Amino acid sequence: MKILGLLVIVVLLVALPMVFSRNPQVVDFHYHFDSLNAPLSHLLLAAFCAGLLAAFLIILPAYFGYRWRLRKSRKRIIALEAQAGVDEKDSTVDSITLSRSQQKKALLKRERKRSRQATREAGAPVTTPAQPQTAESGSMAATAKRPSN
């Protein structure tokens, strides 16, 4: 796909100077309010750019709509697989189709869920890594370590 885009750019870069060199004659361009005397090559370039802009504006909403739906579907698949307990090696979502940040987020989410399940099975209370210690728990730990005289 990248090769095709590169090929189109090269063809345009070769074709545009040819169009400019072959059409130097000045023509009258009459539009709704006024008229314009300009070289034919400039008018052809302006028409090409206007068509390119129109195509871009027509395709742009559909492109972002498809990307939004794809991202939403990937998140849904990851959530369903996490809920079903599917191992990351058996995942339906191919690692090539996910961006690296999405892969890392999914992996972290799975690891957190596995660690919570492991602590629940062991009977230990579930704590989060960012849970601050209270002053009482710190002072109790200090008094427990101090030898009694």
Image (cartoon, rainbow, N blue to C red):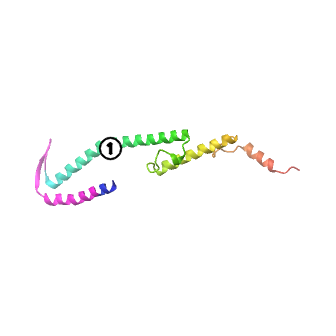
Name the residue rendered at 25%, 44% in the picture: 54
Say which quarter of the image contains residue 126: top right
Instruction: Give the SS element for disc 1.
Output: helix
Q: Residue furthest right?
A: 149
8 displayed left or right of 107:
left
One can see residue 105 in this view: no
Q: Residue at x 67, y 40 (%)?
A: 121
Residue 22 position within the rendered picture, expressed as x and y whole percent measured from the top left: 13, 59
Q: Is residue 33 magenta?
A: yes
The quarter of the picture where residue 31 lies is top left
Mark 1 lies on residue: 60
Number of numbered discs visible in the structure rendering? 1
In this rendered view, identify the residue nearer to me: 44 or 72.
72
| Left or right placement of residue 64 versus residue 100 in this view | left
| Residue 63 horizontal side relative to residue 115, left or right | left
Residue 15 part of the magenta-drawn span: yes
- Which of 71/139 is in front? 71
Horizontal and vertical percent for residue 63? 35, 43
Amino acid at circle 1: Leu
At horizontal 43% and vertical 43% (from top left) the residue drawn is: 71
Q: Residues within 10 Å of mark 1 (few under 14, many from 20)?
A: few
Q: Is residue 19 visible?
A: yes
Query: Residue 90: x, y in percent?
Result: 51, 46
**In the displayed structure image, the side of residue 84 where residue 54 appears, left or right:** left
| Residue at the (77%, 47%) spot, across then down | 141
Q: Residue furthest front?
A: 90
Residue 4 quadrant: bottom left
**What segment is highlighted magenta in the picture?**
7-36
The foreground one among 54 and 36 is 54
